[in-house]
Image: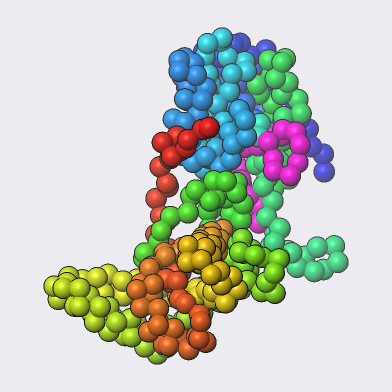
Amino acid sequence: MTLEVLPVSGLPEIRPGDDLADLIVAAVGADGLGDGDVVAVAQKAVSKAEGRLVPEGEGKVAWVAREASRIVARRGDLVIAETRHGFVCANAGIDVSNVPRGSLSLLPEDPDASAARIAAGISERTGRKVGVVVTDTFGRPWRRGLVDVAIGCAGLPALLDLRGEPDREGRLLESTVMAIADQAAAAAGIVMAKAGGVPVAVVRGLPRPSDAPAGAARDLVRPATEDLFRSAPLYAISSRRTVRAFRDEAVPDDAVERAVAAALTAPVPHGSRHRAPPWRWTILRRGERRRRLLAAMADAWRRDLRADGFPEERIERRIERSDAILAAAPTLAIPAVSLEGADAYPDARRREAERDMFLLATGAAVQSFMLALHAQGVGSSWISSTLFCKEEAATALGLDAGWLPMGAVAAGFPAEPPPERPPVDPSPAITWL
């Protein structure tokens, strides 16, 4: 097998409205392309031709905010963002290189459609069936340096699925899916010198089965459900949302166990003096024990709210609201705290402060539990109900004396993706001294 990568020189400066297929055919000549060739076109050239240059105006940061659908990570001036195309890249793909001063280059609106138009235009002018990839340089997690990838693709497979094929030893491949469009883009990137005005290259001899269907660059975007590294830790924390509607799908035991392990890392009052954290977690699947818990809580609520003079209709609305989530969630987790490790100060104020320390620490444990679920794609909602009937809930759960239930966490896979959390301005909550 021989692979050739041929730079295409002699193209003029690209202007808005230019026909890239015309310019490419003029540069390579009528006989310069063959069936099966892959033409790589730099994103900047496509953006220029499609009028995707904008005045810098308010600045690059403002344009990144407009073009990004989600901020993935941020450090100093560097912003890793997801674009509306699904690409995760620096600054939502906005760039200032090789554009007039005072301008910014945005990604094409639809790079796959751009690639398809260029491929069709070349075919009309030459009679050759070529593939086209629109390329851009992306950084990569875990590795330094930039490499060209395909953000648009037409006329060739974006992915080549080799699963089920034998390797040299006859073993069947189980997970090998090659990003062939990215490989073509990376090969072309070697000769597409950014400082040399070479925005197009031809990749010849790219191996691919003749019966492999053509794909699109959007096929390369990993779905959110498969993304194990969807957000940087800081943004993962702030992106957790309360989920109240769940799919009818059990939460795996190991996901719950990992979440409890995270909860147990919360700050412990007098931690060095404890052999174990002062928390226990009772995990309830659906069934009779959960029904008994909810019935006991409802009876206690009715008794106490009636004593407080609440109208019956309001009481039942409260119970119904709470039960709707607690009964429907595939998994219910009840955190309980023991105050046995609290110091018995003779002064009442110090005893109260000691109790507050344990309760605050429990809040941190619950938050860690919910964040760990969120990191595994599991939604959750904290419901305070058991706090109003601790004794009844403890009895229904069979907790030992001294263990106080501290609300409940309803957990399950969200019925639909929760909305992105809008930006939060922390300044009103901060006093700098």
Residue 269 x/y as whole percent? 61, 64
- Taking the spot 42% from the left edge, 65% from the top edge, the residue there is 382
Front residue (pair 12, 282): 282
- Taking the spot 61% from the left edge, 21% from the top edge, the residue there is 24
Residue 432: in sight, yes or no? yes
Residue 373 x/y as whole percent? 54, 63
Task: Give the side of residue 16 with respect to residue 270, left or right.
Answer: left
Task: Give the side of residue 257 with respect to residue 405, left or right.
Answer: right
Quarter of the image where one finds residue 80: top right
Residue 289 x/y as whole percent? 42, 88
Range shown magenta:
139-161
Relative vertical location of residue 191 with respect to residue 321 in this rendering, above or below: above
Residue 317 x/y as whole percent? 21, 71
Relative vertical location of residue 82 with respect to residue 252 in this rendering, above or below: above
Task: Give the side of residue 300 with respect to residue 237, left or right.
Answer: left
Residue 35: in sight, yes or no? no
